Amino acid sequence: MNILVINCGSSSLKYQLINMSDESVLAKGLVERIGIEGSVLKHEIEGMDKVVIKTPMKDHKVALGLVLNALVDEKHGAIKDMSEISAVGHRVVHAGEKFSESVIITDEVLKALEDCIELAPLHNPANLMGIDACKELMPNTPMVAVFDTAFHQTMPKASYIYPLPYELYEKYGVRRYGFHGTSHRYVCQRAADFLGKKLEDLKIITCHLGNGASLAAIENGKCVDTSMGFTPLEGLVMGTRCGDIDPAIVTYIMEKEKLNLEEVNNLLNKKSGVLGISGVSSDFRDIENAAEQGNERAQLALDTFNQRVKKYIGSYVALLGGADVLVFTAGLGENSISNREDICKGLEFMGIEVDPAKNNIRGKDAVVSTDNSKVKVLVIPTNEELMIAQDTLELVK
Ligand code: ADP
């Protein structure tokens, strides 16, 4: 059974066609600049040169049509006919408090997701455009929605309520939702499997460290706290997002710099984080290079990032009453040897002991802690697409 996984952004569409009999990726690709000049589809098949198709794409439906054509193309296709796609799994960012698990997409589900647009105005409309395009182009293929927020719905109220007037929660749903849930769920299960343990028996802290970054505290396979909040702006220092700051700074800089709502939002989301501190880049590789060449602000950005992750790990160990497993994932978590080492340095007293030789790896499942380390420290490459495909298969079969 082949499952098509779709992840739509406002001007992009990422896809993977996965053969679920062996979970192999038959084809994958990315459409960029949908609805703007220079639309391009980059389509990849294992063992073949990447195919690049440049043609105007006015909306997601046109883009998806080109993707489906590419998938069945005689030369660079992966399947003969569209009927070989059994189901479509869609990544959807925000399900509010409505869904705590993946669901088959029905008209009621779509209505519920439209109600969540207010909570994720940048993401949900794009996700819904992808679903609409699929409904039109492949009306008889079942579809499933997999939500970034769903995994975190098990958080106890004390973890998700903000110390604001309670009516704001009741009236507007102002609470912690958490994001990257599909990734946290995937890596915690994979970590348990890798260690040959039952997920239900473990206290796990997962660190998803990419451009966006978040931690989750997981007990019995259920999320009990996570660092992102009402939006993906809270928590860790990120590529361009500030994470936790004193909220009074917002009104202060608005006044000093004469910023309106949109401008201050832009500053906190796009100009802050390690980019804001270093002034170099939002990409950790650039920052690491600059730091090596003696750029003090680049080093400061790395130190601030690592210190914030360390503080969250400490607080989650306290919250869980100990930890059995610490997992690093996503671009930086999987690849940055020095970040992992710096984050864990000094945590030996709580049983976290990284082995420099074992830690000298990138991008593969591995234990990187010493044999004596009470907490097993793991690197687990995330695979949100596979998680979406597995959920889709489970629901449609
Ligand atoms: P997202 O999906 O949120 O865009 P990723 O999970 O792809 O992000 O992570 C991107 C980040 O990972 C970038 O900042 C990049 O610099 C960092 N990264 C990727 N490879 C390496 C590496 N080898 N060393 C250090 N950082 C890396």
Image (spheres, grey):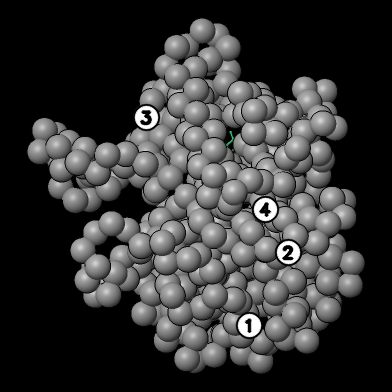
| Foreground tag (1 vs 2) | 2
Is the CB–ligand 1 distance for label 4 below 8 Å?
no
| Foreground tag (3 vs 2) | 2
Where residue 204 sits: x, y (%)?
A: 67, 51
Could you classify mark 2 by the number of other residues whose Cα lies within 10 Å: few (under 14), some (14-19), or many (20 or more)? Answer: few
> Could you say which is closer to the camera, residue 195 or residue 254?
195
Seen at 82% across and 23% down, the residue is 357
Is the CB–ligand 1 distance for label 3 below 8 Å?
no
Nearest to N terminus: mark 1 or mark 2? 1
Which quadrant does ligand 1 occupy? top right
Q: Quadrant of residue 392?
A: bottom right
With respect to residue 336, does 247 lie above or below?
below
Seen at 38% across and 25% down, the residue is 277
Residue identified by numbered label 3: 276
* Residue 93 in view, yes or no: no
Question: What secondary structure is found at the residue carrying circle 1?
Answer: strand
| Foreground tag (3 vs 1) | 3
Residue identified by numbered label 2: 200
Alpha carbons under labels 1 and 2: distance apart: 30 Å
Nearest to N terminus: mark 3 or mark 2? 2
What is the three-letter code of the residue carrying label 2?
Glu
Could you classify mark 4 by the number of other residues whose Cα lies within 10 Å: few (under 14), some (14-19), or many (20 or more)? Answer: many
Could you classify mark 1 by the number of other residues whose Cα lies within 10 Å: few (under 14), some (14-19), or many (20 or more)? Answer: many
Residue identified by numbered label 4: 203
Q: Quadrant of the N terminus?
A: bottom right
With respect to residue 44, does 90 lie above or below?
below
* Residue 86 in view, yes or no: yes
> Could you say which is closer to the camera, residue 356 or residue 238?
356
What is the three-letter code of the residue carrying label 4?
Lys
| Foreground tag (4 vs 1) | 4
